[in-house]
Image (cartoon, rainbow, N blue to C red):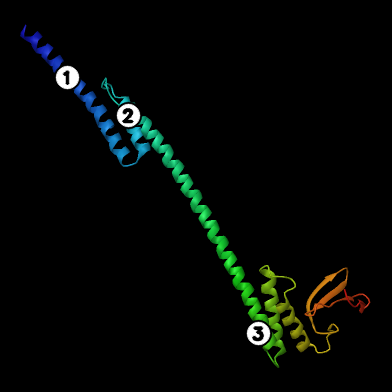
Amino acid sequence: MRLLITGILFLFFSFTLAAQSNYDCFNRFYNEGIKLYNQKKFDEANAQFKAAKICDHIPDKTDIDEWMTKAVECAMKTKEDAELEKKKAENDLKHAQESLAAAKQISFLSLAQKLATKSTQIINDPQTQGLLAMQAFLLNKENGGSDYDPTIYDALRTALLQLDGSANSLTSSLRLPRALFEKNNILYFADIEGTVIGWDLDRSSVSFNKI
């Protein structure tokens, strides 16, 4: 009889310890999940809640499903926020690069104007004058400046005359030309008075005097 009672007590305590161990399994993962959730580690928290749900014994009343739902929703929102932040950073970088490029373009165009003006002020040094005029022209062209910029044109014309005094030059009835363009092999130029003349490049003559 004593052995029977001892066996029953052993089984009772073994069952109690096993049940307590199963509760400890659930509580350990459950509490760790809440801790991670509060640290905003939502994916890790959800993994702990899933582990708690596969323990042998789960309390009859538990809010673990609600915690799992919140962890999943917060994880998704965190990823969405991170993606939006990434896109915003990329757009900010793009705008910064565009602003920098525009600022550089303006700076180079301003430099082209300064070089062209400086070129026309040089006396008795046609080589330097020509180099400055050509650099001004290239900077203006490479940075979207007008093809018919009068300051650039004046620098080129003046430099050409200094380098080659016999070079052909065109004058209107009033003043030296301020702008040039070519179409259908006819060179058109205008002076500051508004006179426009066309020069036929094939015939090397003025095809008409005033437009």
What residue lies at 14% left-to-right and 15% top-to-bottom? 12
Which residue is under mark 1?
16
Q: Are circles 2 and 3 on residues that touch, CB within 8 Å?
A: no
Q: Position of residue 59 (x, y in %)?
A: 25, 22
Q: Amino acid at mark 2?
A: Ala
In the drawing, does residue 159 fall left or right of residue 70?
right
For the image shown, how many numbered marks are present on the structure? 3
**Circle 3 crowding by C-alpha within 10 Å: few under 14, some 14–19, many from 20:** some
What residue lies at 8% left-to-right and 10% top-to-bottom? 5
Q: Are circles 2 and 1 on residues that touch, CB within 8 Å?
A: no
What residue lies at 43% left-to-right and 39% top-to-bottom? 77
SS at circle 2: helix
SS at circle 1: helix
Nearer the observer, disc 2 or disc 3?
3
Choose the circle earlier in sequence order: 2 or 1: 1
Quarter of the N terminus within the rendering: top left
Which residue is under mark 3?
118
Choose the circle earlier in sequence order: 1 or 3: 1
Reply above or below: 145 against 88: below
Q: Amino acid at mark 3?
A: Lys
Q: Which mark is residue 51?
A: 2
Q: Quadrant of residue 27?
A: top left
